Amino acid sequence: MTEGTPPGGGRTCVVTGAANGIGRALALRLAGLGYELLLVDMDGDGLESLASELPAVPWTVCADLSGHRGVEQVCQALGKLDRPAALVNNAGMYRGNPLHTYDVPTIERDYWVNVLAPMLLTQAYATPLVERGEPGCVVNLSSTAGEIGSSDAVYGSSKAAVIGLTKSQAMNYAPWVRVNCVSPGLVRGTAIEQRIPEYRHAEYARQEQLTTRLDADSVAEVIEFLISPASRNLTGKVLPVDNGAYPR
């Protein structure tokens, strides 16, 4: 389901997983800066709630990125945008389960959300810009779990793939489209925090070197930086936002 009218001009940001957590915080931040928005999530009620808080009506796409149909729906929406400024591949799937509990269809669904969707959406976003010689920006969301491992092997391995994907995409779409990655640690007040095992929660807390609260707004602020001209010389980079946990 797609609602609203495609935004025009070159100040449109596309955010997946926008209804909650980091995506929601980012949408609120970007709207306050005057960006037009294309917001994507499978949570239609969450999108509607978010839209009611924004100063301007966003274009929303209610789509499930765990398969080809939902990804294609968003790709079609991207094709209707006039020179979108940025794509943020924020949508992610985390179950917090050990590998032996997964079956193949579940692994495939999670890899669609965490890896294939960012791959294909970036392709749909960046290819026209490169062909026209116009600038663009992509921000992928990985995780500390993609750098150091996770008790959920499907999640950890898929987020590691996002890091490799970012570096390769940066090469593929240079010099026109910059592609960078944000790697959050344990973000407080999110669904993932509620699902991780208690021993992992304690491990994150023990490793953090800063006591500043790490929440969705903290991560959204770094994403905003990567979208802005202030990061014009950065591409193919991974920025950890983790209070200094697990120095690497």
Image: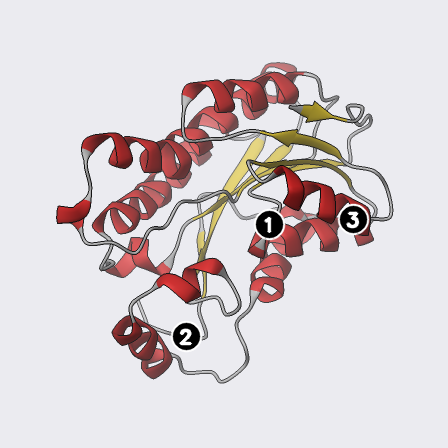
Q: Residue 240 appears in which quarter of the rendering? A: bottom left
* Amino acid identity at mark 1: Gly
For disc 3, the marked residue is 31
Judge the density around disc 2: few (<14), some (14-19), many (≥20) Cα neighbours within 10 Å: some
> In the rendered image, which quarter is residue 59 located in?
top right
Query: Viewer-proximal residue, 64 or 137?
Result: 64
User: Residue at (57%, 32%) from the top-left corner?
Assistant: 177
| Mark 2 secondary-structure assignment | loop
Mark number displayed over residue 23: 1
> Where is residue 136, by image quadrant?
top right
Residue at 50% over, 70% down: 188
- How much space separates mark 2 and mark 3, taking CA atoms? 29 Å
Q: What x and y, as percent, mark residue 103?
A: 19, 36
Inter-mark Cα distance, 3 to 1 = 12 Å
3D distance between C-alphas at marks 1 and 2: 22 Å
At label 2, which amino acid type do we have? Gly
5 up-or-down from 38: above or below: above
Q: Secondary structure at mark 3?
A: helix
